[in-house]
Image: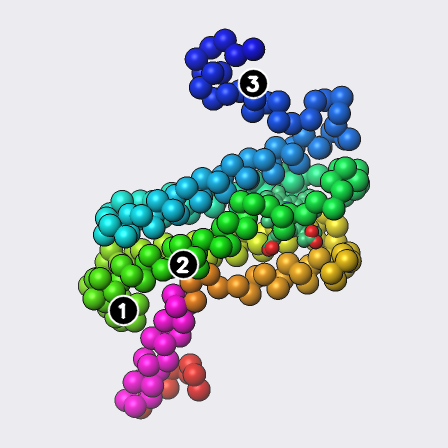
Amino acid sequence: MATTDYEKYIRTDELLALQKKPEELSCHDELQFQIVHQASELYMKQVEHELRFFAVLIAEDKTPRAVTALRRVGTIQRVLLHSIDLLDTMAPTDYMTIRLGLGRGSGQESPGFRTMLKLPGEVVWPAFEAFLARQGVTVRQIYDHPHDHHTLFQLCESLLDYDQLLQTWRYRHLMLVYRIIGAGTPSLKGKHSDLLMHGMKTRFFPDLWDVREDVFGDWTKAQEAKGNAPGYHG
Ligand code: HEM
């Protein structure tokens, strides 16, 4: 029963009752498995909170605070990334024991992750595109002259960080999967590793990736016109 203000505010009673009791654990490592997943869901909930806030800020042209919001999202993503290290310390046989109690449960059903996949296209980019239109500037102009559009460039790069960190998480998780169940273990839909590789091709903000190619392509052509041969787009 919570007695201190800390316990009441943090709701430690409810929070600490969300994991299996020691006598219910299928093996020692199950507590860590549950905690890493539960903590990840909480952090992904916070990512959603911050991304929705970003979209509101940018709709109101409040750029400095939007920069800060995105910086925080990246910081949370790095926490998510590092928390995978904990599961590297688990033996494959312990995972097998835990797996028996998971039924058909799969990380693909994670509500937090699904939201992180959905928000860029449904909420973040539409708000950002409308903002750029109001600013009267295109992505290409920002990348042609990044230092003349310092804050806008920072915003674009922070969105690209989101994309990169999400895909880095996917890659890191794939290494964990290789480590625990191996690369060739099949699922009903094919090899797990092939399924996961497929997701890694996603680009959440494709315009921000494409613009690099465009800028580089035009620079290469300009160099060639001057008789230089930089060797790209040859
Ligand atoms: C022992 C550790 C883990 C193993 C062996 C494992 C295994 C897998 C496998 C095999 C898949 C492929 C989908 C499927 O066939 O079910 C998957 C997907 C996924 N797992 Fe894990 N996982 C582990 C830890 C985690 C953790 C800590 C999280 C954090 C929330 C997580 C979140 C996810 C997500 C979000 C997907 C879908 C990924 C995507 O669509 O790109 N997994 N996992």
192 relative to 142, above or below: above
Disc 3 and disc 1 in contact, CB within 8 angstroms: no
The location of residue 98, given as percent across then percent down, is 75, 37
Mark 2 is on which residue type?
Answer: Leu
The location of residue 63, given as percent across then percent down, is 24, 50
Disc 3 and disc 2 in contact, CB within 8 angstroms: no
Mark 1 is on which residue type?
Answer: Thr
Q: Mark 2 or mark 1, which is nearer to you?
A: 1
How far is the residue under mark 3 from the one under mark 1? 51 Å
Q: Which residue is mark 3?
A: 13
How far is the residue under mark 2 from the one under mark 1? 16 Å
Q: Circle 3 — which element?
A: helix
Residue at point 30%, 71% (across, down): 140
Question: Who is closer to the viewer here, 26 or 173?
Answer: 26
Of callouts 3 and 2, which one flags the residue occurring earlier in the amino acid sequence?
3
Tell me the quadrant of the picture where the N terminus can be found: top right
Magenta part of the chain: 207-226
Looking at the image, what colour scheme do you see? Answer: rainbow
Residue at point 32%, 62% (across, down): 129
Q: Mark 3 vs ligand 1: CB under 8 Å?
A: no
Of callouts 2 and 1, which one flags the residue occurring earlier in the amino acid sequence?
1
Residue 53, quarter of picture = top left
Residue at point 21%, 66% (across, down): 136
Q: Circle 2 — which element?
A: helix
Q: Which residue is mark 1?
A: 138
How far is the residue under mark 3 from the one under mark 2? 39 Å
Q: Which residue is mark 2?
A: 160
Magenta-colored stretch includes residue 41: no
